[in-house]
Image: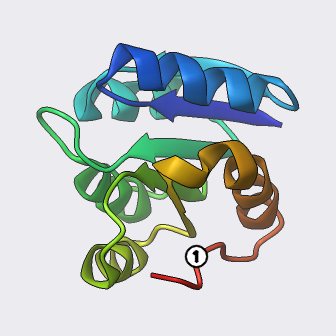
Amino acid sequence: MRVVVADDNPKWLLMLASIVEAKYEVVSTAIDGKSALQSISQAKPDVAVLDLEMPGLNGLQVTREIMSNGQRPPVVICSVDTTQEVVEAAREAGAAGYVFKHCCTRDLVAAIEAVAGGRVFFPSTA
């Protein structure tokens, strides 16, 4: 499975990419929303993993853009924000999954598998 990973924090980007690479191919990484959109357009991934807060376009804006232009790889938002309102905003934007960063070691691969299989992955404790 081919995955694009985007996060504006270099340490988080490296960590998320290494978690994904343990099982899947990271075809591109991005450090902001605009480059995430470009990576998704060019790499045609099976899944996109996006940070919520990025410069330029945030993860929700990138998700809305993906959903509106027909590319539509399923999106997993990965964020430190655990509020129910933000999780619901991600769902409404079109994200198929949401992973809390403090749980990403445990949940990220499961979320990618779920959304790639046409299912959703949202935290039950949000």
The relative height of residue 15 versus residue 68 in the rendered view (above or below) is above
- The spot of residue 101 in percent (x, y) is 48, 48
The local crowd at label 1, few if under 14, some if 14 to 19, many if 20 or more residues have their Cα within 10 Å, is some
> Which quadrant holds residue 82?
bottom left
Q: Residue at x 62, y 23 (%)?
A: 17
- The spot of residue 36 in percent (x, y) is 38, 31
Residue 71: tell me if it is visible: no
Which one is nearer the viewer's eye here, 61 or 53?
A: 53
- The spot of residue 23 in percent (x, y) is 88, 31
Q: Is residue 18 left or right of residue 87?
A: right
Instruction: State how many labels appear.
Output: 1
Residue under pointer 1: 122
SS assignment at label 1? loop
Quadrant containing the C terminus in the rendered view: bottom left
Quadrant containing the N terminus in the rendered view: top right
Display coloring: rainbow
Q: Residue at x 43, y 17 (%)?
A: 11
Q: Residue at x 31, y 60 (%)?
A: 81
Q: Is residue 39 left or right of residue 15?
A: left
The amino acid type found where label 1 is placed reads Phe
> Which quadrant holds residue 110?
bottom right
